Image (cartoon, rainbow, N blue to C red):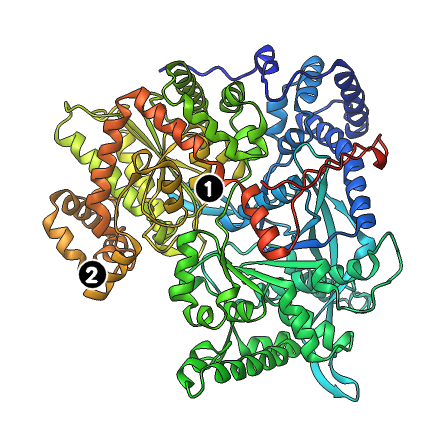
Amino acid sequence: MATYKPQTDHEKRKQISIRGIAPVENVVEFKKAFNRHLHYTIVKDRNVATPRDYYLSLAHTVRDYLVGRWIRTQQHYYEKDPKRVYYLSLEFYMGRTLSNTMVNLGIQSACDEALYQIGLDIEELEEIEEDAGLGNGGLGRLAACFLDSMATLGLAAYGYGIRYDYGIFAQKIEDGWQVEEPDEWLRYGNPWEKSRPEYVLPVNFYGRTEDTGSGVKWVDTQVVFAMPFDSPIPGYGNNTVNTMRLWSAKAPNSFNLHFFNNGEYINAVCDRNQAENISRVLYPNDNFFSGKELRLKQEYFLVAATLQDILRRFKSSKFGSRDPVRRSFESFPDKVAIQLNDTHPSMAIPELLRIFVDVEGLPWDKAWGITVKTFAYTNHTVLPEALERWPVSMLEKILPRHLQIIYLINHNFLQEVAKKYPGDAGRMRRMSIVEEDGEKRINMAYLSIVGSHAVNGVAALHSEIIKSETFREFYEMYPERFQNKTNGITPRRWLLLCNPGLSDIIAEKIGEEWVTDLYQLQNLKKFADDENFLRNIIKVKQENKMKLAEYIQENYNIKVNTSSIFDIHVKRIHEYKRQLLNCFHIITLYNRLKRDPNQAFVPRTIMVGGKAAPGYHMAKLIIKLINSVAKVINNDPIIGDRLKVVYLENYRVSLAEKIIPAADLSEQISTAGTEASGTGNMKFMLNGALTIGTLDGANVEMREEMGDENIFIFGMKVDEVEELKRSGYNPRHYYETNPDLRLVLDQLYTGFFSPDKPGLFRDLYNSVMGPDRFCLLKDYEDYIKCQDSVSEVFKDPLQWAKMCVLNIASSGKFSSDRTISEYARDIWGVEPNDIKLPPPHEGLDSMDSKPPQKK
């Protein structure tokens, strides 16, 4: 196997066309700023710079380029008073900031050249940065891509979330098992954020309601303070820098001196800990609803602080006035759009009503009309276990006034239902926001639909499912509210940043406009039969594979064959995503090779990565199985390097940036009708990996864009899954009629891969042999045949490369710029624009005032 030499050759990196050559004056200026920051970073009694000192100096230098643009942008919004968009999400999976900022500001060449002249490697410094892992997976990463696109499209937009002290847990694999460790991402501080103590806001919990002469009041509450931390979000090449504001919980009384003086040291700090636990840790279950009190507190904490901030800005931000000038709320929906990223922030609906009615004194009907026009709701899942339903008893205890408001919303809504469908008591019961079956609960998805003017799914198939199944009766009630907004990814991070080699050869052929208009990639189709171009694609892919192979060798001590198919399945571990089906394919390949070691075999390196929710037994057992199978295969001399299995530990954004450019095959194999959209599938497609998948989520639209012949589709469609369940799914039938499948399941049952504990994987055996709602055994045979087709096509490198080019060229639809443009026009009522703000050293008079252009 060829050895990969890391790209330390600076002269080669200087030729990257899409980043340009750094002007000498910029390099000199950057070196001066870097050395100045380094002088203040080094601890004086040490007097020697560590790699982290160099990283912090670089981060602060880059931040200097941001700050002036950040201030200029906010001043521009303040003076022009545009409609503002507020994106509320309990998760923002931002990853690393440094390299993304340099790319978007267009200063990467200057930074690289300056550091090279100083004797430092920019890539080594970039690796020091901790991932900001404030999200579980797709939902949080989507929010991060959306912020990037909103800034690039010139929208006056703000992201609001929680600044968790600990992000998604760090995953360790010990003896094949997942072990969770705390993610101390703030251990060394965060050079990209700015605390804003002047905007600290109170958030109330508990207490009781009291009828007064001036209406209902929420009294005797416990107060927690919300401290904002702002992070800049730079747009690409337009000098726009938007803001992500994350709230941190702070106790009102940090130390109880009375307790301390009486010797009760623990109680002296106990209240503070209780309050600050709200922002202590991210819940690691984004596809399981668990009705924990702390989770409810987090959700309300986010929306209560955010809405106070939104109202403050609305009242004072009008043509530069610093005093509250808006005392009427008539124009509120014209100046404010609030997007709820799933139901996690849906308590914002009763909270805004409470503020309007209890605090501002608006009549209920007027307050309700404004609220509905302001909010929009994005649904991210159809899995029943993921839908939020809060117990009434818990709401009554923690948010008593909000429970009253929800009851009133439900009362008015059910009257509306009764008027439209008279005499249909069953429909009223099914559509009630307050569920009466068993423990009384509040259905937060229903509340979000009733309280919003727009409801969208995140892929065409998903949007149809929520209209025809999940929320069918609500769609019949409000058909005008339901829309589709297929997800997207930012091409800046997921091609320009993570795959510079591919970015280069694309730019050489079609220019650089694709960075902000991904539809330009369709111009690559005319090069799909250009052999020189195809060989360049193959060369770039091979370099990326060699780089990943070196990472695997260093971190897992596994030597992989870079001529093999890099078959990659990275995402959260969940039964519906069917990593177990992939594992069955791995075992099938192993059994074939053991049966006939001399057979013609296309080598594969199969990589699986992802985290399981800590309390999810089956998902953690799947991880153990994959690692147990890997241990057997990787140490079998008969197999050699023809088949290798690697479990990629602690999958995260920065690791994805290494994996995705190297992938040959992308596994998107969820049961049809279970994956809302997926965005990993889009990242692989954009980077020239071919997809094997079911017709689920955005795979459907990907196939439409690229054509049947450029994607490997297998398995049941949504209607076939439903028909199979109606007619009766019998997994034993497939076990008995397919010898390969039977052998795999027998090995699972008898403990072939766990000889020390023969019964270890019987829960997995029982899950697929029982009433498996994900129908794994039904799709097995078709999946294996489809994988065999993959191997056949891979034998022809030029044909494979042509398919890769056509995948890349068909990726235009899946830009988050397109998604956000659709949200802006169809939901928020704002128009994206091409306006480029002048840099800080120029006056506002120099602003390029091109008219808005459709993207």
Depicted 357 relative to depicted 486: above or below? below
Asked whether residue 449 is in view, the answer is: yes
Q: Which residue is mark 2?
A: 729
- Element under label 1? strand
Depicted 734 relative to depicted 108: above or below? below
Report x, y in % for residue 143.
57, 48
Q: Which residue is mark 1?
A: 172
Q: Quadrant of residue 568?
A: top left
Looking at the picture, which amino acid does disc 1 mark? Lys
Camera-side residue of 244 and 701 = 701
Residue appearing at x 40%, y 50% in the figure: 697
Camera-side residue of 85 and 273 = 85
Residue appearing at x 64%, y 55% in the figure: 829
Q: From the viewer's perspective, is 337 left or right of 807? A: right
Depicted 725 relative to depicted 138: above or below? below
Looking at the picture, which amino acid does disc 2 mark? Tyr
Residue appearing at x 75%, y 56% in the figure: 227
Distance from the alpha carbon under mark 1 to that under mark 2: 37 Å
Asked whether residue 494 is in view, the answer is: no
